[in-house]
Image (cartoon, rainbow, N blue to C red):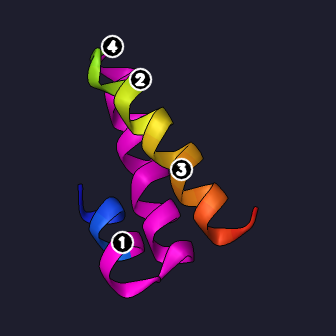
Amino acid sequence: MLGQLLADKKGDFDKALNYLHESLDILQHLRSPEADKVREIIARVQQMAGN
């Protein structure tokens, strides 16, 4: 959840999204159900960043 913290506390959206996308890639590879949660966080951070 480092990506979420970077977005929420530091406003560093680019770095946050990089971490979140890396996490998503790993979770998808592992077929983890947590991938859906990371997708939701990515969408929220993208909205915060104005993307």
| Residue 37, position as x, y percentages in the image | 36, 30
* Element carrying mark 3: helix
Crowd rating for badge 3 (residues with CA inside 10 Å; few <14, some 14–19, many 20+): some
User: Residue at the spot x=25%, y=64% of the render?
Assistant: 2
Question: Separation of disc 4 and disc 2 at Cα?
Answer: 10 Å
Mark 4, residue position: 31
Secondary structure category for the residue under label 4: loop
Tell me which numbered mark, 2 or 1, is placed earlier along the sequence: 1
What percent of the width, then of the height, locates residue 29? Answer: 38, 23
**Label 2: few (<14), some (14–19) or many (≥20) C-alpha neighbours in 10 Å:** few
Residue that mark 3 sits on: 44
Q: Tag 2, which secondary structure?
A: helix
| Gap between marks 1 and 4 measured at Cα | 27 Å
Residue 44: image x %, image y %? 53, 50
The N terminus: image quadrant: bottom left
Indicate the amino acid at tag 4. Answer: Arg
Q: Earlier in the sequence, mark 1 or mark 4?
A: 1
**Where is the C terminus found, in terms of image quarters?**
bottom right
